[in-house]
Image (tube, helix red, strand yellow):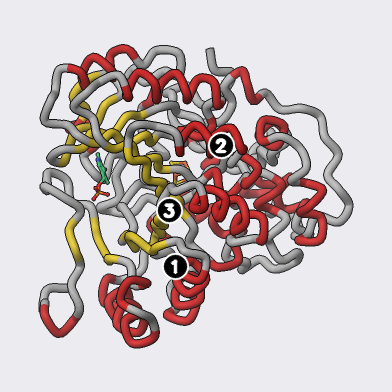
Amino acid sequence: MRNGSTNQSGKILATSEEFVPTAFHLPSELSASALPDLESVSWQVAMKRAIRSGSELRKAVGLPPDSAEVMGADGKLACEHDFQTFAPLEFVARIQPGNPDDPLLKQVLPVVDEQVEQAGFAADPVGDLNALVSPGVLHKYEGRALILTTSACGIHCRYCFRREFPYRETGSRQDDWLPSLNYLQNHPEVEEVILSGGDPLTTSDEKLSELILAIENIPHLKRLRIHSRMPIVIPQRITPELVKRLSSSRLAVWMVIHANHPQELSESVISRLGNMIDAGIPVLNQAVLLRGVNDQAEILIDLCRCLVNHRIQPYYLHQLDRVRGAAHFEVPVETGRKIIESLRAALPGFAVPQYVVEEPGAKSKSPILDTHCNDNP
Ligand SMILES: *Cc1c(COP(=O)(O)O)cnc(C)c1O
Ligand code: SF4
């Protein structure tokens, strides 16, 4: 059982019994200089001591508390009850103290803007519930099926399109992948399995290895893709054991990480991902275009340049999925197009991500083309 009492409907949460919070005193200096110490603990400990409320997070980054009238009696904003705050210290240390506009802070700090209802922003913006073909499996696109490996994440991104996803009702459970495996077994047209979630790398190496073994034992499966933000938020998650397990698989293993801003790419993030790439696992990055975070060409140019300098290929730049509570993150498509044009002018072709939007029912992610070849807004 999960112990997320504030989260009755089984949405994304990191409060499974493995990650119950531990009492932990924040280092007085929670800034980039504290990173080596922070990352010397195991990733499981990092999960347990993550910050779990907006007020705690504000304190940790040296910001004044929210005004009393917007906070509930429990010291939380109403939106925190819908989607709990969760920010590991390793990520928080990369936030510039005292800066309310910090691009990393904006991704994790709950704000009253989330409570503003906005037409067109819904609970299941990408039609995932329609693509649920079996408990825990989404099969939308030809040849690849996505497994909801777990509902836990290593960070709670306020813009997340799965923030309202009913994990509990969809039957994806960390201790029961059998229905998913049966589905894969019975569908020879699937050649690639995508482990997603939640975040599959919040699963232990042992459990993950069992799951991978079961996938390896299905002969028609050729590729394994892992979608995870853990390498960015808690880089020590890339353990030598994990690298070894993935690189010795009979499957072609691809890793897709999720960074939105160059400030997320700390030295250890880069070096741990380097270990993975050295072991023969290609690493791609996806980002979401977010207002106030990365909606300027220079920021995304820096991000993509840093990625390719370290052999990571920018894959997708996603237009925001219109999930309830995230309207304040939306960037107009026209702005996105101009940004992509600037990227194209500044970077090698392989460093420019595909700008895409997810449309319910479509056969793939839908490309948003450059201004000069598409007049639709
Ligand atoms: C995004 C997504 C994929 C992967 O799409 P690619 O274009 O291959 O990266 C697969 N299945 C589902 C359900 C998805 O949402
Ligand atoms: S964007 Fe990814 S890592 Fe962030 S909350 Fe959503 S599923 Fe979890």
Q: Residue at x 65, y 52 (%)?
A: 91
Outermost residue on the right side: it is: 28
- The spot of residue 314 in percent (x, y) is 38, 64
Q: Secondary structure at mark 3?
A: strand
- The spot of residue 286 in percent (x, y) is 39, 57
Residue mark closest to the camera, 3 vs 1: 3
Q: Taking 124 as reference, is 275 above or below it?
A: below
Occupied quadrant, residue 356: bottom left
Q: Secondary structure at mark 2?
A: loop
Number of marks in the rendered image: 3
Q: Which residue is mark 1?
A: 291
Decide if residue 277 is in sight here. yes
Q: How far apart in space, not on screen, are marks 2 and 3 (Cα)?
A: 29 Å
Q: Residue at x 43, y 47 (%)?
A: 281
Q: Residue at x 58, y 41 (%)?
A: 238
Q: Nearer the viewer, residue 188 or 127?
A: 188
**Residue type beneath disc 1:** Arg
Q: Which residue is mark 2?
A: 84
Q: Are there few (<14), some (14-19), or many (20+) residues within 10 Å of tag 2?
A: many
Q: How far apart in space, not on screen, are marks 1 and 2 (Cα)?
A: 21 Å
- The spot of residue 294 in percent (x, y) is 47, 70
Closer to the N terminus: mark 1 or mark 2?
A: 2
Q: Nearer the viewer, residue 7 or 153?
A: 153
- The spot of residue 4 in percent (x, y) is 57, 23
**Residue type beneath disc 2:** Gln
Q: Which residue is mark 3?
A: 283
Q: Quadrant of ligand 1?
A: top left
